Image (cartoon, grey):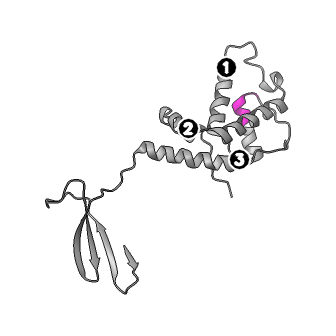
Amino acid sequence: MKRTLPWSDQVDVISSDESSSSSSSSSSLDVDVQVNDETTNVATDQPPKEVSSEDLLIRKAEIYQEYMKQLPIPTCRGSIIPFTTWMGLGRSIKQLYEQPLHYLTNILLKQWDQLRIGSEDEHRPLDIVVHPCKAEATIWLVEELHRRTSSHHHIAKLWLSDPMCHAFIDSIFPQL
C-alpha cells in the first residue's frame, strides 16, 4: 500500500503469511517495509488479531439491533388488514408500512401460528377470531419492545442456535 508521508518518501508495507525459518518467535509477524527502492524485513511482536465467527455474529447482531432501534413505530394505522395467520398479518404489515419487523417479532408470530394447531379455531381465519385492529396493535406493541429492549448478545445467541435464522430476518435495506 502506498501512502504519502510527511516527507517525500513512500513506504510499501507487505505482510507475509508464510512461516519463515528465521529466528523470530511464532507469535511475531514478518512485515516487509519498502522505503523508496530499499526493502527491510521487520518482525513485529503483535500477531494479527483473529476474529472468530461468533464475534462477527455478535457484531452483526449489534449493528442489526442499532438499526432496528432507529426505525420509528407507525403511530397511525393505514387500513384494516384482513389476515388468516399471524405470519400473514406480519407480511401485510411489512408491505403496508414498508419496514421490516424485528427477528424476534417474526419468531413470535411463527410461534403464535403454531399454537393454533389443534385448537377448535385452527381452520377459521384469524381476523374472525381476533379483531384486525387489535391484532395489528399487538404486533406493533411487541415490535416496539423488541426494537427498544432486546440485547444484541441474546439475538446473536439465538442466531447461533438456529441454522434457519436468516429466514426470519427481514431485509433492512430500503427499496429505492
Residue 66 to residue 86: above or below: below
Query: Could you tell me the amino acid type at mark 2?
Result: Ile
Residue with the mark numbered 1: 115
Q: Indicate whether residue 86 is drawn in magenta.
A: yes
In the visual, does 21 lie left or right of 172?
A: left
Badge 3: few (under 14), some or many (20 or more) residues near its Cα, within 10 Å? many
Real-space Cα distance between discs 2 and 3?
19 Å
- Which residue appears farthest toward the bottom when viewing the image? 8
According to the picture, the residue beneath numbered tag 3 turns out to be: 99
Where in the figure is residue 125, as x and y percent of width and height? 78, 24
* In the depicted structure, whether residue 47 falls above or below residue 134: below
Q: Nearer the viewer's eye, disc 2 or disc 3?
A: 2
Q: Main secondary structure of the magenta part?
A: helix
Helix, strand or loop at mark 1: helix
In which quadrant will I find the N terminus?
bottom left
The residue beneath circle 2 is 155
- Looking at the image, tell me whether mark 3 or mark 1 is earlier in sequence order: 3
Residue 57 position in % (x across, y down)? 48, 44
Q: Earlier in the sequence, mark 2 or mark 3?
A: 3
Q: In the rendered structure, find residue 60 and report the number of the disc placed on it.
A: none
Cα distance between the residues tagged 1 and 2:
23 Å
Which is nearer the N-term, disc 1 or disc 2? 1
Q: 135 left or right of 58?
A: right
In front of the other: 170 or 30: 30
Residue at (65% x, 40% y) in the render: 102
Can you say which quadrant of the picture contains the C terminus? bottom right
- Mark 3 lies on a secondary structure that is loop
- Labels 1 & 2 near each other (Cβ < 8 A): no
Q: Which residues are magenta?
A: 84-90
Give amino acid for label 3. Gln
Q: Residue at x 71, y 14 (%)?
A: 119
